[in-house]
Amino acid sequence: MTSTKTFASQADLQEKQVSFTRLSDNAYAYTAEGDPNTGIIIGDDAVLVLDTQATPVMAQDVIRRIREVTDKPIRYVLLTHYHAVRVLGASAYGAEHIIASEDTLDLIKERGEQDKASEIGRFPRLFRNVESVPPGLTWPTITFTGKMTLWLGKLEVQLLQLGRGHTKGDTVAWLPQQKILFSGDLVEFDATPYAGDAYFTDWPQTLDNIAALQPQQLVPGRGPALTTPEAVAAGLAGTRSFIADVRASVEAGVKAGLDLNATYKATMAKLAPRYGHWVIFQHCMPFDVTRCYDEMSGHTHPRIWTAERDIEMWKALES
Protein backbone atom coordinates (compact mmCIF):
# COMPACT_ATOMS: atom_id res chain seq x y z
CA MET A 1 0.00 0.00 0.00
CA THR A 2 1.37 3.41 -0.89
CA SER A 3 1.27 6.32 1.52
CA THR A 4 0.30 9.83 0.57
CA LYS A 5 2.03 12.96 1.78
CA THR A 6 -0.10 15.36 3.82
CA PHE A 7 -2.15 17.32 1.30
CA ALA A 8 -0.68 20.62 0.13
CA SER A 9 0.09 23.05 2.97
CA GLN A 10 -1.87 21.18 5.63
CA ALA A 11 1.42 20.20 7.24
CA ASP A 12 2.53 23.86 7.40
CA LEU A 13 1.59 24.84 10.94
CA GLN A 14 4.63 26.85 12.03
CA GLU A 15 4.04 30.50 12.87
CA LYS A 16 5.96 32.99 10.74
CA GLN A 17 7.98 36.00 11.88
CA VAL A 18 6.47 39.21 10.49
CA SER A 19 8.62 42.06 9.15
CA PHE A 20 7.36 45.57 8.39
CA THR A 21 9.95 47.12 6.11
CA ARG A 22 10.13 50.80 5.21
CA LEU A 23 11.22 51.40 1.60
CA SER A 24 10.53 55.15 1.62
CA ASP A 25 8.29 57.68 3.38
CA ASN A 26 5.49 56.37 1.16
CA ALA A 27 6.13 52.64 0.78
CA TYR A 28 6.17 49.75 3.24
CA ALA A 29 6.21 45.96 2.92
CA TYR A 30 4.45 43.58 5.31
CA THR A 31 6.22 40.22 4.89
CA ALA A 32 6.26 36.97 6.83
CA GLU A 33 8.90 34.41 5.84
CA GLY A 34 7.24 33.30 2.62
CA ASP A 35 3.62 33.83 3.59
CA PRO A 36 1.66 36.13 1.24
CA ASN A 37 2.93 39.72 1.41
CA THR A 38 0.92 42.92 1.72
CA GLY A 39 2.12 46.26 0.33
CA ILE A 40 1.31 49.66 1.81
CA ILE A 41 1.49 52.98 -0.06
CA ILE A 42 0.99 56.13 2.03
CA GLY A 43 0.11 59.27 0.09
CA ASP A 44 -0.50 62.83 1.23
CA ASP A 45 -4.13 62.22 2.07
CA ALA A 46 -4.83 58.47 1.99
CA VAL A 47 -3.40 54.95 2.20
CA LEU A 48 -3.50 52.22 -0.48
CA VAL A 49 -3.18 48.58 0.64
CA LEU A 50 -2.08 45.98 -1.92
CA ASP A 51 -3.36 42.45 -1.22
CA THR A 52 -5.22 42.00 2.00
CA GLN A 53 -4.15 38.79 3.79
CA ALA A 54 -6.36 35.72 3.95
CA THR A 55 -8.85 36.80 6.63
CA PRO A 56 -9.98 39.98 8.39
CA VAL A 57 -8.36 38.67 11.58
CA MET A 58 -4.97 38.43 9.83
CA ALA A 59 -5.55 41.85 8.27
CA GLN A 60 -5.81 43.39 11.74
CA ASP A 61 -2.07 42.92 12.23
CA VAL A 62 -1.41 44.80 8.97
CA ILE A 63 -3.68 47.62 10.13
CA ARG A 64 -1.90 47.75 13.49
CA ARG A 65 1.45 48.21 11.70
CA ILE A 66 0.00 50.89 9.41
CA ARG A 67 -1.32 52.78 12.42
CA GLU A 68 2.19 52.83 13.91
CA VAL A 69 3.34 55.01 10.99
CA THR A 70 0.26 56.99 9.85
CA ASP A 71 -3.27 57.92 10.87
CA LYS A 72 -4.37 58.67 7.29
CA PRO A 73 -7.50 56.83 6.13
CA ILE A 74 -7.12 53.53 4.26
CA ARG A 75 -9.11 54.61 1.22
CA TYR A 76 -8.02 52.07 -1.40
CA VAL A 77 -7.39 48.34 -1.59
CA LEU A 78 -5.75 46.90 -4.72
CA LEU A 79 -6.17 43.25 -5.67
CA THR A 80 -3.00 42.47 -7.64
CA HIS A 81 -4.86 39.33 -8.76
CA TYR A 82 -7.61 37.07 -7.47
CA HIS A 83 -6.63 34.28 -5.12
CA ALA A 84 -8.54 33.80 -1.88
CA VAL A 85 -5.43 33.91 0.28
CA ARG A 86 -4.80 37.43 -1.08
CA VAL A 87 -8.25 38.96 -1.01
CA LEU A 88 -10.58 37.57 1.67
CA GLY A 89 -9.22 39.92 4.36
CA ALA A 90 -10.41 42.97 2.41
CA SER A 91 -13.42 43.79 4.60
CA ALA A 92 -11.17 44.63 7.57
CA TYR A 93 -9.79 47.78 5.98
CA GLY A 94 -13.08 49.61 5.50
CA ALA A 95 -11.75 51.04 2.24
CA GLU A 96 -13.90 53.25 0.04
CA HIS A 97 -12.70 51.50 -3.10
CA ILE A 98 -11.42 48.04 -4.03
CA ILE A 99 -9.53 48.17 -7.33
CA ALA A 100 -8.79 45.31 -9.73
CA SER A 101 -8.12 44.77 -13.41
CA GLU A 102 -11.06 43.87 -15.63
CA ASP A 103 -9.33 40.52 -16.26
CA THR A 104 -9.29 39.86 -12.52
CA LEU A 105 -13.00 40.63 -12.35
CA ASP A 106 -13.54 38.05 -15.10
CA LEU A 107 -11.76 35.47 -12.97
CA ILE A 108 -13.87 36.31 -9.90
CA LYS A 109 -17.03 35.80 -11.93
CA GLU A 110 -15.78 32.61 -13.56
CA ARG A 111 -14.12 30.80 -10.65
CA GLY A 112 -14.22 32.88 -7.49
CA GLU A 113 -16.37 30.47 -5.48
CA GLN A 114 -14.38 27.40 -6.50
CA ASP A 115 -11.09 29.19 -5.78
CA LYS A 116 -12.30 30.16 -2.31
CA ALA A 117 -13.22 26.58 -1.39
CA SER A 118 -10.01 25.25 -2.93
CA GLU A 119 -7.65 27.60 -1.10
CA ILE A 120 -9.33 27.31 2.28
CA GLY A 121 -8.70 23.57 1.98
CA ARG A 122 -5.05 24.09 1.01
CA PHE A 123 -4.02 26.55 3.74
CA PRO A 124 -5.52 25.70 7.15
CA ARG A 125 -3.01 27.87 9.07
CA LEU A 126 -3.72 30.96 7.00
CA PHE A 127 -7.48 30.38 7.12
CA ARG A 128 -7.79 29.29 10.75
CA ASN A 129 -9.93 32.42 11.38
CA VAL A 130 -12.03 31.78 8.29
CA GLU A 131 -15.21 32.46 10.27
CA SER A 132 -14.22 36.15 10.24
CA VAL A 133 -14.55 36.28 6.43
CA PRO A 134 -17.95 37.77 5.51
CA PRO A 135 -20.19 35.70 3.23
CA GLY A 136 -19.55 35.89 -0.48
CA LEU A 137 -16.53 36.99 -2.49
CA THR A 138 -14.36 40.11 -2.55
CA TRP A 139 -15.69 42.24 -5.40
CA PRO A 140 -13.92 45.30 -6.86
CA THR A 141 -15.71 48.65 -6.92
CA ILE A 142 -13.38 50.03 -9.61
CA THR A 143 -11.92 48.08 -12.55
CA PHE A 144 -9.53 49.12 -15.29
CA THR A 145 -7.74 47.73 -18.33
CA GLY A 146 -4.05 48.26 -19.02
CA LYS A 147 -3.27 51.28 -16.85
CA MET A 148 -4.86 53.37 -14.14
CA THR A 149 -3.21 56.30 -12.36
CA LEU A 150 -4.09 57.24 -8.80
CA TRP A 151 -2.95 60.51 -7.26
CA LEU A 152 -2.64 60.31 -3.50
CA GLY A 153 -2.14 64.05 -3.15
CA LYS A 154 1.11 64.69 -5.02
CA LEU A 155 2.15 61.02 -5.01
CA GLU A 156 1.62 59.30 -8.36
CA VAL A 157 0.69 55.61 -8.21
CA GLN A 158 0.47 53.77 -11.53
CA LEU A 159 -1.51 50.52 -11.59
CA LEU A 160 -0.24 48.55 -14.57
CA GLN A 161 -1.02 45.33 -16.38
CA LEU A 162 2.36 44.37 -17.85
CA GLY A 163 1.29 40.97 -19.17
CA ARG A 164 -0.02 37.61 -18.05
CA GLY A 165 2.02 35.42 -15.75
CA HIS A 166 0.81 34.22 -12.36
CA THR A 167 -2.77 34.81 -13.62
CA LYS A 168 -4.33 36.60 -16.57
CA GLY A 169 -5.30 39.53 -14.35
CA ASP A 170 -1.93 40.40 -12.79
CA THR A 171 -1.51 44.04 -11.77
CA VAL A 172 1.59 45.78 -10.42
CA ALA A 173 1.74 49.10 -8.56
CA TRP A 174 4.52 51.45 -9.60
CA LEU A 175 5.75 54.59 -7.89
CA PRO A 176 7.57 56.27 -10.80
CA GLN A 177 8.91 59.14 -8.69
CA GLN A 178 10.70 56.68 -6.38
CA LYS A 179 11.16 53.71 -8.72
CA ILE A 180 9.48 51.34 -6.25
CA LEU A 181 7.41 48.45 -7.60
CA PHE A 182 4.90 46.13 -5.92
CA SER A 183 4.76 43.04 -8.12
CA GLY A 184 2.18 40.77 -6.54
CA ASP A 185 2.92 37.12 -7.31
CA LEU A 186 4.57 37.88 -10.65
CA VAL A 187 7.85 37.96 -8.69
CA GLU A 188 8.83 35.83 -5.67
CA PHE A 189 12.07 35.71 -3.73
CA ASP A 190 13.35 32.51 -2.11
CA ALA A 191 9.77 31.30 -2.38
CA THR A 192 8.32 28.96 -4.98
CA PRO A 193 6.06 30.62 -7.56
CA TYR A 194 2.58 29.15 -7.54
CA ALA A 195 1.65 28.56 -11.18
CA GLY A 196 -1.60 26.64 -11.01
CA ASP A 197 -3.41 29.45 -12.84
CA ALA A 198 -0.39 30.66 -14.80
CA TYR A 199 0.63 31.35 -18.38
CA PHE A 200 4.09 29.84 -18.70
CA THR A 201 4.51 31.06 -22.28
CA ASP A 202 3.80 34.70 -21.34
CA TRP A 203 5.39 34.98 -17.90
CA PRO A 204 9.05 35.54 -18.96
CA GLN A 205 8.10 38.49 -21.21
CA THR A 206 6.05 39.98 -18.39
CA LEU A 207 9.12 39.79 -16.14
CA ASP A 208 11.12 41.54 -18.86
CA ASN A 209 8.47 44.28 -18.90
CA ILE A 210 8.91 44.71 -15.15
CA ALA A 211 12.69 44.86 -15.55
CA ALA A 212 12.31 47.52 -18.25
CA LEU A 213 10.87 49.91 -15.65
CA GLN A 214 14.24 49.62 -13.84
CA PRO A 215 12.81 49.42 -10.32
CA GLN A 216 15.28 50.28 -7.58
CA GLN A 217 13.20 48.46 -4.95
CA LEU A 218 10.55 45.76 -5.28
CA VAL A 219 8.03 44.09 -2.98
CA PRO A 220 7.46 40.53 -4.23
CA GLY A 221 4.39 38.40 -3.62
CA ARG A 222 6.30 36.20 -1.19
CA GLY A 223 9.67 36.66 0.44
CA PRO A 224 11.46 39.71 1.85
CA ALA A 225 11.33 43.19 0.35
CA LEU A 226 14.07 43.69 -2.24
CA THR A 227 15.66 47.00 -1.30
CA THR A 228 18.57 47.33 -3.78
CA PRO A 229 18.76 47.10 -7.58
CA GLU A 230 20.94 43.97 -7.15
CA ALA A 231 18.30 42.29 -5.00
CA VAL A 232 15.58 43.26 -7.50
CA ALA A 233 17.60 41.70 -10.32
CA ALA A 234 18.06 38.53 -8.25
CA GLY A 235 14.33 38.29 -7.60
CA LEU A 236 13.49 38.68 -11.27
CA ALA A 237 16.19 36.22 -12.33
CA GLY A 238 15.15 33.59 -9.78
CA THR A 239 11.49 33.76 -10.75
CA ARG A 240 12.36 33.69 -14.46
CA SER A 241 14.66 30.68 -14.11
CA PHE A 242 12.10 28.69 -12.12
CA ILE A 243 9.34 29.29 -14.66
CA ALA A 244 11.70 28.45 -17.54
CA ASP A 245 12.99 25.29 -15.85
CA VAL A 246 9.50 23.97 -15.09
CA ARG A 247 8.43 24.65 -18.65
CA ALA A 248 11.52 23.03 -20.21
CA SER A 249 11.11 19.85 -18.18
CA VAL A 250 7.36 19.55 -18.70
CA GLU A 251 7.59 20.37 -22.39
CA ALA A 252 10.20 17.63 -22.78
CA GLY A 253 7.90 15.18 -21.02
CA VAL A 254 4.95 16.06 -23.23
CA LYS A 255 7.04 15.75 -26.41
CA ALA A 256 8.31 12.36 -25.23
CA GLY A 257 4.75 11.18 -24.71
CA LEU A 258 5.06 10.84 -20.92
CA ASP A 259 1.90 11.00 -18.85
CA LEU A 260 1.42 13.65 -16.15
CA ASN A 261 2.64 11.43 -13.31
CA ALA A 262 5.90 10.53 -15.06
CA THR A 263 6.44 14.14 -16.13
CA TYR A 264 5.87 15.31 -12.56
CA LYS A 265 8.36 12.87 -11.09
CA ALA A 266 11.00 13.79 -13.69
CA THR A 267 10.44 17.50 -13.11
CA MET A 268 10.66 17.16 -9.33
CA ALA A 269 13.94 15.27 -9.71
CA LYS A 270 15.37 17.97 -11.97
CA LEU A 271 14.25 21.00 -9.96
CA ALA A 272 14.54 19.86 -6.33
CA PRO A 273 18.35 20.28 -6.13
CA ARG A 274 18.10 23.94 -7.17
CA TYR A 275 14.75 25.04 -5.75
CA GLY A 276 13.78 22.46 -3.15
CA HIS A 277 14.78 24.73 -0.25
CA TRP A 278 12.40 27.49 -1.39
CA VAL A 279 9.29 28.05 0.71
CA ILE A 280 6.22 25.95 -0.34
CA PHE A 281 8.16 24.03 -3.00
CA GLN A 282 6.45 20.74 -2.11
CA HIS A 283 3.08 22.46 -2.05
CA CYS A 284 3.35 24.29 -5.37
CA MET A 285 5.00 21.75 -7.64
CA PRO A 286 2.02 19.43 -8.21
CA PHE A 287 -0.15 22.41 -9.18
CA ASP A 288 2.61 24.02 -11.26
CA VAL A 289 3.45 20.90 -13.22
CA THR A 290 -0.22 20.05 -13.78
CA ARG A 291 -0.94 23.51 -15.19
CA CYS A 292 2.21 23.51 -17.32
CA TYR A 293 1.40 20.04 -18.65
CA ASP A 294 -2.03 21.35 -19.68
CA GLU A 295 -0.53 24.41 -21.39
CA MET A 296 2.14 22.40 -23.22
CA SER A 297 -0.64 20.02 -24.31
CA GLY A 298 -2.60 22.83 -25.95
CA HIS A 299 -4.87 24.06 -23.14
CA THR A 300 -4.14 27.79 -23.37
CA HIS A 301 -6.25 28.84 -20.39
CA PRO A 302 -6.02 27.35 -16.89
CA ARG A 303 -8.70 24.90 -15.86
CA ILE A 304 -10.64 25.75 -12.70
CA TRP A 305 -9.27 24.28 -9.48
CA THR A 306 -11.88 22.94 -7.08
CA ALA A 307 -11.38 21.40 -3.66
CA GLU A 308 -12.20 18.02 -5.19
CA ARG A 309 -9.82 18.46 -8.13
CA ASP A 310 -7.06 19.53 -5.73
CA ILE A 311 -7.23 16.32 -3.72
CA GLU A 312 -7.67 14.11 -6.78
CA MET A 313 -4.58 15.65 -8.37
CA TRP A 314 -2.57 15.43 -5.15
CA LYS A 315 -3.33 11.74 -4.70
CA ALA A 316 -2.51 10.99 -8.34
CA LEU A 317 0.90 12.69 -8.18
CA GLU A 318 2.02 12.21 -4.58
CA SER A 319 0.90 8.63 -3.89
Image (cartoon, rainbow, N blue to C red):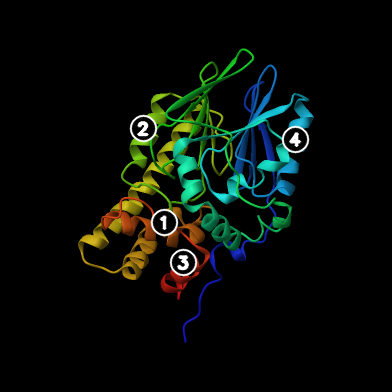
Residue matched to label 3? 309
Residue matched to label 4? 65
Residue furthest bottom in the image: 1
For the residues labelled 3 and 1, the Cα–Cα distance comes to 14 Å
State if disc 1 and disc 3 touch (CB < 8 Å). no
Q: Amino acid at mark 1?
A: Asp
Q: Residue at x 30, y 58 (%)?
A: 250
- Marks 3 and 1, the one that precedes in the sequence: 1
Q: Secondary structure at mark 3?
A: helix
Q: Amino acid at mark 3?
A: Arg
State if disc 1 and disc 2 touch (CB < 8 Å). no
Q: Secondary structure at mark 2?
A: helix
For the residues labelled 4 and 2, the Cα–Cα distance comes to 33 Å
The circle drawn on residue 288 is 1
Q: Position of residue 294 (x, y in %)?
A: 32, 58
Q: Position of residue 210 (x, y in %)?
A: 42, 30
Residue matched to label 2? 208
Please name whichever residue, 78 or 13, is drawn nearer the observer in this view of the structure: 78
Front disc: 3 or 4 = 3
Q: Amino acid at mark 2?
A: Asp
Q: Residue at x 47, y 51 (%)?
A: 194
